[in-house]
Amino acid sequence: MHTSLIDLMTTEDSAEEPRPNRSPWRQRLVDAERGITQCFRMSSTLFFDFFAISILLCTAVVVELSLLTWALVFLCVILIIAGELIYDSIQKLAVENRELLSNKTLELLNVVNAAILVQIVGSFLTIVFILGVRIGELDWF
């Protein structure tokens, strides 16, 4: 039976039902879905990101981006969502284990959080820049 990381951490005397026997790739997808669900439950920033991304994507449809710029926009969207998931998981780790972490580890977590924030802001700005250039090309103003 293939086990996930969560299964490895639970004990045998747990009251939970045993998970069905799944292939490794399917179990990985199930674990990823659970992670996204947990991130939605514990953080409202992902809701804001999806709202802002949906507005930007609707704008991209209206201004008719080229195939290459669509690829860049999708890459930025993926970076934003992945960055938020990583940021939220690091925050949860730091809050849960704050008393166990050394000052150096907390400083490292701050640097990682800053790097993820730069990634998210840079991706948003890239999408806005792409849309701004395209709107400028359309000569609407």
Image (cartoon, rainbow, N blue to C red):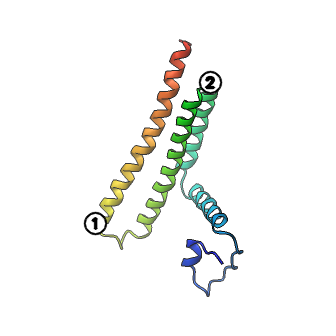
Tally the numbered discs.
2
Q: Position of residue 81 (x, y in %)?
A: 53, 48
Residue under the image location 61 percent in, 86 percent down:
12
Q: Amino acid at mark 1?
A: Asn
Q: Position of residue 83 (x, y in %)?
A: 48, 50
Q: Which of these two is toward me, 31 or 94?
A: 31
Helix, strand or loop status at disc 1: helix
Residue under the image location 45 percent in, 34 percent down:
125
Please give the residue where the numbered disc 1 appears in the rendered image.
103
Q: Find the distance from the CA under tag 1 to the CA under tag 2.
A: 50 Å
Badge 2 density bin: few <14, some 14–19, many ≥20, Cα 10 Å: some
Residue under the image location 59 percent in, 57 percent down:
36
| Earlier residue among tags 1 and 2 | 2
Q: Is label 1 or label 2 in front?
A: 2
Helix, strand or loop status at disc 2: loop
Q: Amino acid at mark 2?
A: Glu
Q: Which of these two is toward me, 5 or 1?
A: 1
Please give the residue where the numbered disc 2 appears in the rendered image.
64
Badge 1 density bin: few <14, some 14–19, many ≥20, Cα 10 Å: few
